[in-house]
Structure formats: C-alpha cells, structure tokens
Image: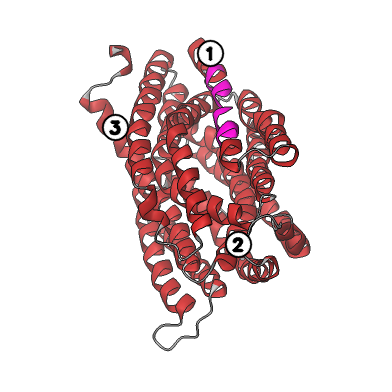
Amino acid sequence: MRKLIGDKKFYRMILGIAIPIMIQNGITNFVGMIDNIMVGRVGTEQMSGVAIVNQLFFVFNLCIFGGVSGAGIFGAQFYGQDNQEGVRSAFRFKIIICTIMLAISMIIFSGFGTSLISMYLHEGSNVGNITLALSYGESYMRIMLIGLIPFMMIQIYASTLRETGQTLTPMIAGIISVIVNTTLNYILIFGKFGAPALGVEGAAIATVIARFIEAGIIIVWTHIHYKKNQFIVGIYRTLRIPTDLSKQIIVKGMPLLVNEALWSAGMAMLMQCYSVRGIAVVAGYNISSTISNMFNIVFIAMGSTVSIVVGQLLGAGKMEEAKDTANKMIFFSVITSIVVGLFMGAIAHVFVNIYKTDEEVKYLARSFIRIVALMMPIQAFLNAAYFTLRSGGKTVITFLFDSCFVWVVSIPVALFLTRLTGMSILWIYFICQFADIIKCIIGYVLVKKGVWLNNIVE
C-alpha cells in the first residue's frame, strides 16, 4: 500500500498540473450545464432537442480530441527532450488532421442533420412532443455548426500548451468564456434587457460567441508570449512535417483517433438504444449526463495528468520513475473518485429539481445520476489505466481496450435489452455500465506488465 502513496512533493506536482486542467474542463462542462439548465427551464422538448444535437457534436469533439492526442503523445515526449522543433511538428500535424475532420463533419451535419436527430425521437412515454423536439434540435444545430471552428482551434492550442507545462492560460480563457456564455445565455434565451427571447437559438448564439472569445485569448496569448512558447515561433511558415515523424504519428496516433471516433459514436449509439423507451428517457439521460460530466472532470483531469507526467518521464528515459508515478496516480485517481461519487449521489436530487420538467423525467435523471456515482471508481481506474498505456504509445491496445469493447459488448447488450425485453431502463443502464468491470481486469493486467514502458521519440 505504501508504494501507492506519494509524498507531499509528489501531490503538489500532480495537483499543480491536474487542478488547472480540472478547472478548464470544469468550465467547459459548466458552460454545457448552464446551457442545459437554462434551456431546461424553457421546456422538455427544447431540452431534448438540444441534448440530441450535443450528443451528435460529442462525436466531433472526441474526434478532435483524438486528433490532437495522437500528436500530443509525441509533443509531450519531445518537450521532455527539450526538442522545440519536434513540438512544432506535432502542432502542425494537429492543424492538418483537425482541419480535415472539421470539413468532413461540416458536410455530414449540414447534409444529414435532420435524419441524425430523428434517430433519437421515439414514442414510448407520456412526456414530450417529438415534432417540436426535432424542430428545436434543427434550429440549435444550424447555429452551433459555426462554433465547431473555434472549438477546433482551442483544442489544438490548449493541448500543446498543456504538453509544454502551460496550463494556466487555457484555464483563464475558459473562465472568461463561461462568464460570457452564462451572461449571454440569460439575455438571449429569456429575452432580458430588451433582447428578444430566442430560446434554443439564443443558447447556441451565446455558446458560439463564447467559443470565439476563448479561442482568441488562447491564440493571441500564445503568440505574444513566444519566449515561453518557443514552439510557436515560425509555426505557420510551413505546414511541412518530416516524413518519418508523420509516419510515426500516423502509426501511433491513428488508432487513437479511430478509437475516439468509434468510442464517441458508441456513446451516441448507446443513447439511441436508450431513446427507444421514449423522450422522457432522452431528457432524463441528458440531465444525468450534464450533471455527471461536472463531477467526472476529477478523474478525467487525472488521466490527462498521467499522460503528461508519465509521457515526459518516458521521453527522458526514466522508466522506473514512470512506472512508480503511474501506479501512484492511478491509486490517487480511484480514491478521489470514491469521495466525489459519494458526494454526487448524495446531492443528485438538488440538481434535478433545478429543471422545469415532468416528474417522470426527474425520477429517471436522479436514478441515472446515482448509477453513475456508484460506477465512478471503476471509470476512474479505467481512465487512468487508458492514459498510462497511451503515454507509452500503446495506442492499438487502447483502441481494443476502449472503443472495441463498446461496440462488441456494451452496444449489443443495450440493443438486446432495450428492444427484446421489457426490463426497466434503469436496470438496462446499470448492466451496461457495470460491464466495464471486464475492462478493469484487462487494464490492470496490462499496466502491471509494463507493456507501455517505451520511449517513442528516442
């Protein structure tokens, strides 16, 4: 047990990286929660339409995350070697891959948005009007498409800043963003201070404006402080990347990108499975996801910290220190998640009562939240193990470990139980969540064996 507990210096170092990431991720999720709550105060149909669109955009968001993460593995290790040209090349790769994904996503959402939203709208409960929910979803999507551009740039710049130890600026930019978003939400959704009441369109406009402001702050600060961020010097003089490095990033990073795409699509598919039980389930699941995301930032930030700290140690060739650090960080993540999960489960009813919706929706939301709280230690271990394996370039293993499991196990179980049985949606949700215990066992074995102890930029 003592081997899993670090000293004060260790925790100061870990929290020094993790807390700014938690704050920034918390801000991002807080923006989503504020959108969700304010739209939820308007009505169930509006909230459901927005929830469905955000679930679809979640696939894009995770694809961008996968794109920057693949190159980010190299960026963190290059920075550990003090190789600024290597960090620069990793940044350029992010620009190229994310621009390609943005173009593809714009075409898909513009051409097939209505059909995608309709997949989630089914009869099955006494709550909500499907036609209205579709209309609200379409209106919200049209405006939010513009916000994909600044979101992409935020992820490219912020991820590189984190890899080089600069976590404060993305956090500050995020704080400003949430203030702008919250203020504009209040004004535009409800029509305050003489503005028209725009409902879901107001929520979308507020989010897009806030994202442009956040992106502007991060980009301008990075270029002005070029002495701190040496990788940015001459970054756009060319987008050429050394051929050998491009091949390495593609080989190591493509499984990660495909993994994020398939995993996020799997999450969207799971929501679609649950949605066949009616719009009340969509609304309840949406409330639960929104609240859960606010609490999940703790173990998600710990995963990102594992990736940064362990990645730098591997790049510096400190294999034993990397292994010891990873074990302690995984343990710390699980312990903190137990505390967070208990707190989230205890106050679930407080959050749910904020929403102006039907009692059926509130009951489902409370129950979903408590199931998530119960499973949080499992998810914390999985997340930390995933990033440990990824830090050493074992992206093919993480691909099998993560997205393949969703499509091979979770989705077939959900499809079978939702369509061929009369089982309660709450039991179905619990079973699908608990199935991740299988991944815990696999992750434990892989981490303990040390298959991830690799220097990939040597």
Report helix, strand or loop for mark 3: helix
Where residue 104 appears, as percent x and y from the top left, is 73, 54
Q: Left or right: 122 with respect to 236?
A: right
Residue sitting at x 60%, y 33%: 432
Q: CA distance from mark 2 to mark 3?
A: 49 Å
Q: Residue type at mark 2?
A: Val
Among the 4 quarters of the image, the one containing residue 138: bottom right
Q: Looking at numbered disc 3 in the image, what kind of residue is underneath it? A: Met
Q: Position of residue 161 (x, y in %)?
A: 43, 46
Q: Which mark is residue 13?
A: 3
Residue labelled with disc 1: 445
Magenta run includes residue 269:
no
Badge 2 element:
loop
Q: Nearer the viewer, mark 2 or mark 3?
A: 2
Q: Nearer the viewer, residue 365 or 208?
A: 365
Mark in front: 3 vs 1: 1
Q: Position of residue 112 (x, y in %)?
A: 77, 61
Q: Amino acid at mark 1?
A: Val
Q: Which residues are magenta?
A: 430-441
Name the magenta segment's main secondary structure.
helix
